Image (cartoon, rainbow, N blue to C red):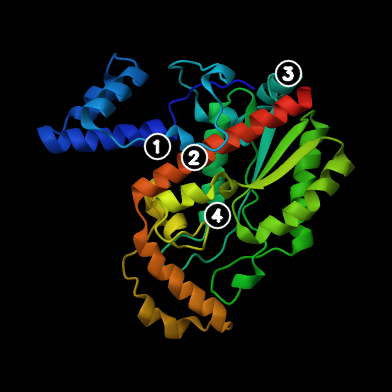
Amino acid sequence: MTSGRSLCYRDAKLVNATVSRLEAVSRTGSLRTIIMSSSVSRRALFEGLGAALALPAIEAADFVGAPTASTIARGGNSYVNSRKVLLWENTRKEFREAIEGGVLKAVIVPCGSCEQHNEHLAMIHDTASVTLVAHQAALQLYPQVMLTPPVSVGISPHWMDRKGTLSLRRETFLAVVFDICDSLKTHGVRNILILNGHGGNQAPLAQSVEEFRSKLGINIQAHSYWRAYSAEIIKKYMESGVVPGHAAEFETSFAMAAFPERVHWEGVDYEKAKPLLHIKDPASAKEEEKFAREAKLASTAKGEAMIAIAMNWVADQLRQMSANAAA
């Protein structure tokens, strides 16, 4: 499975970081316009600015299972409209031509949750994070991969004593995921990656994926995106040493990098909130306190590093699925 290169998450973040540093030096306030309208190629621009400003780089070794240059046919500086990898944004004509023409090789089914994420993160976090990783991986492999709308409510009975959490019964959740896979099979999709972003979904999916494969007769894999992180990567980037945790250092860093508008520290005082929470399980309450402290270790830079590693790992899983299916 080859990849097209898109102007996407990492590039946009690098533009913003570069502009911020340059503006701090020049104080002209106009460099964003200059960069975005420059006739210099995007890759050359980033490489030149990165070298000049010594922008931090993620080491190649951190991309677990990252393909080498010999296994990737990059699309140069081409721009890919991000809607093209979103199944729900495609027309039936576009999808039909992609699958019948043999261009579309795999589809990602993102699965998340809508549940409490302590006092400071939006409840959509798991769904938003897994969808972002799936989206960026699909863009890397355009036009060979699309993603479906996410399954946005998961299995969360363990959080039902925290207000706002929504939960599905195990059998309901699995039936929804199976029916989505069945729909894709009906349309000719032969490779499906169920990509999970919520801990409560992980074991049920792992226990059910073989049954899904057997019933549908196609190549289906199920992984949580944090499988991308080796012990060495976690040690390098997470001071707490915990991934994924819950609304702690990792997830807060992810949100700060990807969607800071979903991080709300304003008015948050965990000590004052504790008497209002009425958490039934003392062990769970103690763990939540620990995660609340660890959330303060979060940073945008950590989130950017972890997102980049995850999206490359997912892209590599899709390459392997496609290669195994063709063998």
- Element on which disc 2 rests: helix
The residue under label 4 is 126
Q: Quick one: quadrant of the N terminus?
A: top right
Above or below: residue 46 compared with residue 256:
above
Residue at the image point whose x is 76% and y is 19% from the top: 100
Looking at marks 2 and 4 on the same chain, the residue that comes earlier in the sequence is marked by: 4
Looking at marks 3 and 2 on the same chain, the residue that comes earlier in the sequence is marked by: 3
Q: Left or right of 165: which side holds 202? A: right
- Check if mark 1's residue and mark 3's residue have beta carbons within 8 Å: no
Other residues around mark 2 within 10 Å, as few (<14) / some (14–19) / many (≥20): many
Instruction: Residue 171 in the image: state x and y as whole percent.
Output: 79, 60
For discs 1 and 4, the disc positioned in front in the rendered view: 1
For discs 2 and 4, the disc positioned in front in the rendered view: 2
Residue 309's disc number: 2
Looking at marks 1 and 4 on the same chain, the residue that comes earlier in the sequence is marked by: 1
The residue under label 3 is 102
Instruction: Residue 16 in the image: state x and y as whole percent.
Output: 29, 36
In three-dimensional space, the C-alpha distance between marks 2 and 4, rounded to whole angstroms, equals: 17 Å
